[in-house]
Image (spheres, rainbow, N blue to C red):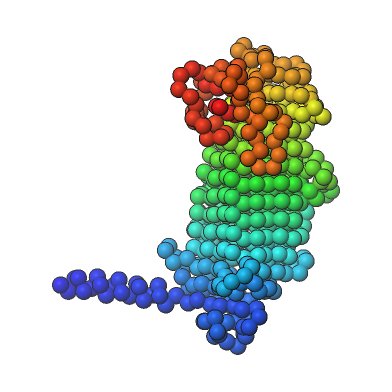
Amino acid sequence: MREKWCIILVLACLTCSRAAAPVYFVDAVSGDDSNSGRSPAGAWKTLAPVNALQLEPGSRILLRAGGEYEGPLNLTGSGALGSPNTVGSYGEGPKPHILRGPGSGPVVSLYNGSHWEIADLEISGGTIGVFAYMKEFGIARSLHFRRLDIHDVRGSLTGDDGGFLLKREGEETWFDDLLIENCTIERVDRNGILLTDYPTAKDTHHSTGVVIRGNHLRDIGGDGIFILGCDGAVIEHNVLRYAHQRVGRRPGERACAGIWPHRCNDTLIQFNEVSHTAVGGVTVWDSEAFDDDVSCRGTVFQYNYSHHNAGGFLLMCAGSRGTIVRYNVSENDAVATFTLESDGTGGATIHNNTIYVGPELSVTLFRNTSGAPDTLRFVNNIVHADGQMVHSPRGITGITCSNNAWFGNIRNRPEDPAAILSEPGLIAPGTGGEGFGTIGGYRLVPDSPCRGAGTAVPGDPGIDLFGNARPDGGGPWVGACHG
């Protein structure tokens, strides 16, 4: 009996501890910083009292909806497993708006903390929208950012500023369970979302459990979504339009792409739409929709829709190996569909993609800009060129093509022992617009020669871009669609 009462007492204490976690209220209209901040009626007026807090696990900071709050908001302390610290809103109306003047630093910052949930805020101004900085901290666990509207952040074009900057320093410091979900990021410089371990990057540990999902990014000065030093990251269901708008080739400025990992293993990049990278920008320098960069291993690009990117669909470079590219649609991506560069890059499998080149374009299928990339398997793809597609893979060795459909104006078509050379039977190629809902024209007509005409590829999920399983009977299909 005594043991039973002890258990009840411990549970009661835990319940009281959770219930006692403080809640702080801020009301830009009716608050007063001389108040306690512990109730809506006693709310603070500004963020200054919040910035002075060392928060304990389970603390909540609530900003009244519809108010404008002069930043910065500086957060310190950590939550705990099951008791995260949170920042959000209360009341009716638009999201609370935290803003800073131009060039004034981060708007919202978190230094050396774990177990935080930050949601439902509007953030603008400054040089960084959200800055999470971990230095010699250990493992920064469970940092979740949801439904943040970040805009008009004008940082440096030569640095790491932008919408989100998540930075770790120290050989024993990394992120675990980092989530950025359903945020909007517009008119920011330099980057949309950057997770970096520079300048002290080492591969002793990689960040884990990184998920970047469901975000909408538009008008980004440089890179859209860029992650460094991660294992098993997932980047999915994001929409990115008009990245690489203001970064050029001036001193200190670097090449840009839409979505890319760097020194990462087993990254999954899927169901993203990337368009108009560098279109209307200062220069076309890289400027692909996607990039598999320095020493990446096993990156999978699948079920993505890429269109009207000034530099092409995909860059593989700097020793990336084992890349898998499958069930994507590329429409009117300029310059080169695939660019490979640097010795050691290769070992890639590209299958079941649909590539369309419009009448106004001349595009290179495989382009090599430096070094001697090697070993590329290109199978079960549709290449439809109403403009001109050129095969000119100088310096790339070991390209193997099989069971692809080649149609239209294709110069120097590569050797393909099971090529389909008749019209592939796409319903309405070239009619894609903004959104996955516009790409039904890349489905196959009932009598398409691409149905069942492919060859088996190890690891093929057997699910097409539209979520259709491969029909029973017959061989694999050609292109990104099974029906």
Q: Residue at x 68, y 55 (%)?
A: 185
Looking at the image, can residue 342 be seen?
no
Depth order, front residue of 108/197: 108
Quarter of the image holding residue 69?
bottom right
Q: Residue furthest bottom?
A: 34
Question: Residue pushed farthest left?
Answer: 1
Q: How many marks?
A: 0
Which quarter of the image is occupied by the C terminus? Answer: top right
- Quadrant assignment, res 190: bottom right
Q: Residue furthest front?
A: 446
In the figure, 124 relative to 201: above or below?
below
Relative image position of residue 305 (x, y in whole percent):
65, 37
x then y, percent, for residue 55: 51, 73
Q: Indicate the quadrant containing the N terminus: top left, top right, bottom left or bottom right.
A: bottom left
Image vertical order of residue 129 relative to residue 427, above or below: below
Q: As drawn, is 389 to the left or to the right of 94?
A: right
Left or right of residue 316: residue 139: left
Extreme residue in the top direction:
417
**Could you say which is closer to the camera, residue 78 or residue 216?**
216
Question: Is 182 placed left or right of 248 in the picture?
Answer: left
Q: What residue appears at the point 53 percent right and 77 percent down from the top-left corner?
A: 24
The spot of residue 35 in percent (x, y) is 57, 87
Residue 110 lies, in percent from the top left, at 59, 65
The reply to whether residue 431 is visible in this rendering is: yes
Which residue sits at x=79%, y=42%? 279
